[in-house]
């Protein structure tokens, strides 16, 4: 039992193997698109259930203040990387259009 990254690395390795594509093509012969969808949904559900089981099994790591702090920090970092970097890029574009690339306002040359 466990959630192992190695399993996903192995899946990616199998996913780029043309033999796997051939086998899947043979498996899905004479099937409808709903069968493909159901297979993907079942696989996804199994993966989520496995992760949920492990997190419940190792419940303490995110339920204590340090673990929860890690969760909050990673959430904040994700928000910062998505939102604040986008905002900073927009400001840099405005400044670049007004003052030229880099702009003296943003990047003053030392005298």
Image (cartoon, helix red, strand yellow):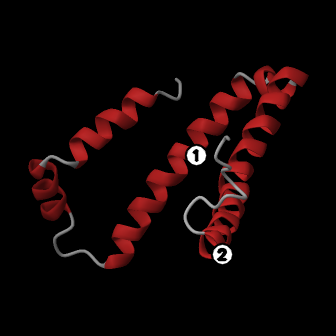
Which of the two residues, 42 or 87, is positioned nearer the viewer here? Answer: 87
Q: Residues within 10 Å of mark 1 (few under 14, many from 20)?
A: few
Q: Residue at point 73% right, 58% down? A: 105
Question: For residue 5, which numbered disc appears in the image?
Answer: none
Q: Say if 5 sits above or below 39 in the image.
A: above
Image x and y of residue 40, in percent: 41, 60
Q: In this figure, which residue is indicated by the disc labeled 2?
A: 98
Query: Can you give x and y, in whole percent of width and height, for residue 101 in the image?
Result: 55, 64
Is 2 placed above or below 34 here?
Answer: above
Note whether 69 is above or below 52 in the view shown.
above
In the image, taking residue 105 as reference, residue 39 lies left or right, namely left
- Mark 1 or mark 2: which comes first in sequence? 1
The local secondary structure at tag 1 comes to: helix
In the rendered image, residue 41, in percent from the top left (x then y), is placed at 48, 61
Q: Residue furthest front?
A: 111
* Residue 48, disc: 1
Q: Total label count?
A: 2
Residue most extreme to the right: 65
Q: Quadrant of the C terminus?
A: top right
């Amino acid at each position: 039992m466990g959630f192992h990254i190695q399993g996903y690395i192995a899946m990616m390795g199998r996913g780029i193997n043309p033999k796997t594509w051939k086998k899947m093509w043979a498996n899905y012969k004479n099937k409808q698109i709903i069968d493909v969808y159901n297979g993907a949904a079942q696989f996804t559900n199994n993966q989520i259930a496995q992760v949920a089981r492990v997190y419940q099994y190792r419940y303490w790591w995110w339920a204590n203040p340090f673990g929860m702090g890690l969760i909050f920090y990673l959430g904040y970092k994700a928000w910062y990387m998505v939102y604040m970097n986008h905002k900073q890029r927009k400001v840099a574009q405005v400044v670049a259009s007004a003052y030229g690339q880099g702009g003296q306002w943003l990047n003053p040359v030392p005298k």
